[in-house]
Amino acid sequence: MKALTLISVFTSLILQMSCVEPACAAEKKYIGPLPCAGECHKEVFDTWKSSKHATAFGSLASGAREKEKKEAGLKPGVDYQKDKSCLPCHVTGWIDGGYSFENPDPYLQGVGCESCHGAAGRWNEPHQKKDLENRKRHLKQKGQREPFKGKYVCVGCHEEDTNPYKFRSPPGKTDWTEPKHAASYHALK
Ligand code: HEC
Ligand code: HEC
Ligand code: HEC
């Protein structure tokens, strides 16, 4: 029995190691914000946690944000968490291997780290190796994004045409693409 267990453990390890997308469903594309909540990015995580991005899924719930919904011609009594026309901008990784009705991962609710920094399933591990050669380029190949390189990350969701709400710049900022003060991006209230 013991030998059998060992063999199956080894087999699954080998399977995991040889995991190639898209054949391998076990490999997660999105890992959620918790792996980033440790020592390295604790401060960022704590600021983000109470931001509007982090709680964006909650705003879709029936009864939440009544006033704003009425103003936008939406029905406050409707459960928009089940409405797939809302989810692309209010969860992490919709239609991209992240949050879905089949995988309603609570850690992928809201606009998470990966909504702006890219799905981290492939880059989180190499990202932690400080001595990696060509580190940045390597991480980019694995899907890490640099949200400060232009506004394209933000306009994916913040666009007047598709958004029932008008875009507003972050408080106190006239140019929200200005590549400074990361903290202000993480604390967007
Ligand atoms: C995945 C979609 C998505 C991305 C990417 C995104 N946002 Fe947002 N953002 C939202 C949603 C949804 C809300 C509203 C959350 C709520 O209030 O429930 C929001 C809220 C905000 C707010 C608060 C607005 C208010 O009404 O007070 C600001 C400011 C903001 N985002 C700026 C940015 C900036 C700057 C970027 C790029 C660095 C960005 N967002 C990227 C979806 C996104
Ligand atoms: C294309 C992306 C996108 C889609 C689709 C989308 N939203 Fe949003 N939503 C946003 C952004 C961006 C904000 C923040 C707007 C701001 O304040 O500038 C927001 C804000 C909100 C807010 C907070 C109110 C406010 O004024 O800040 C509510 C509530 C909301 N959305 C509900 C919905 C509902 C319900 C749907 C589906 C019917 C939906 N959204 C679809 C991007 C989107
Ligand atoms: C709405 C988009 C958005 C979300 C969500 C977001 N970030 Fe960022 N992040 C940015 C932008 C934009 C910058 C670059 C700002 C700059 O150049 O100063 C940045 C910079 C950073 C940096 C480098 C600068 C610093 O402050 O240390 C780290 C680390 C980081 N983010 C981690 C995270 C983590 C961890 C999360 C989730 C808990 C997260 N981010 C969520 C947009 C976002």
Image (spheres, rainbow, N blue to C red):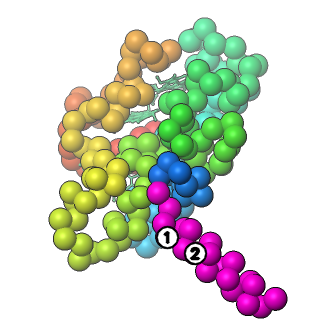
Badge 2 element: helix
**In this orientation, which residue lies closer to the viewer: 69 or 20?**
20
- Horizontal side of residue 179 vs 2, given as left or right: left
Name which residue type carries label 2: Leu
Q: Position of residue 57 (x, y in %)?
A: 61, 36
Name which residue type carries label 1: Met
Q: Which mark is residue 13?
A: 2
- Which residue position is annotated with label 1? 17
Q: Is residue 108 visible?
A: yes
Residue at x 38% of width, y 43% of height: 116
Q: Position of residue 28 (x, y in %)?
A: 54, 55
Q: Is residue 167 above or below residue 55?
A: above
- Magenta span: predominant SS is helix
Asked where in the image residue 9 lies, by quadrant, the reply is bottom right
- Horizontal side of residue 171 vs 173, given as left or right: right
Badge 1 element: helix
Q: Is residue 110 visible?
A: no
Q: How many residues crowd around disc 2 within 10 Å: few (fewer than 14), some, or many (20 or more)?
A: few
- Horizontal side of residue 130 vs 118, given as left or right: left
Quadrant containing the N terminus is bottom right
Question: Is there a contact, CB below 8 Å, between mark 1 and mark 2?
Answer: yes
Q: Is residue 78 above or below residue 82?
A: above
Asked where in the image residue 76 lies, by quadrant, the reply is top right
CA distance for labels 1 and 2: 6 Å
Residue at x 64% of width, y 13% of height: 74
Magenta region: 1-20
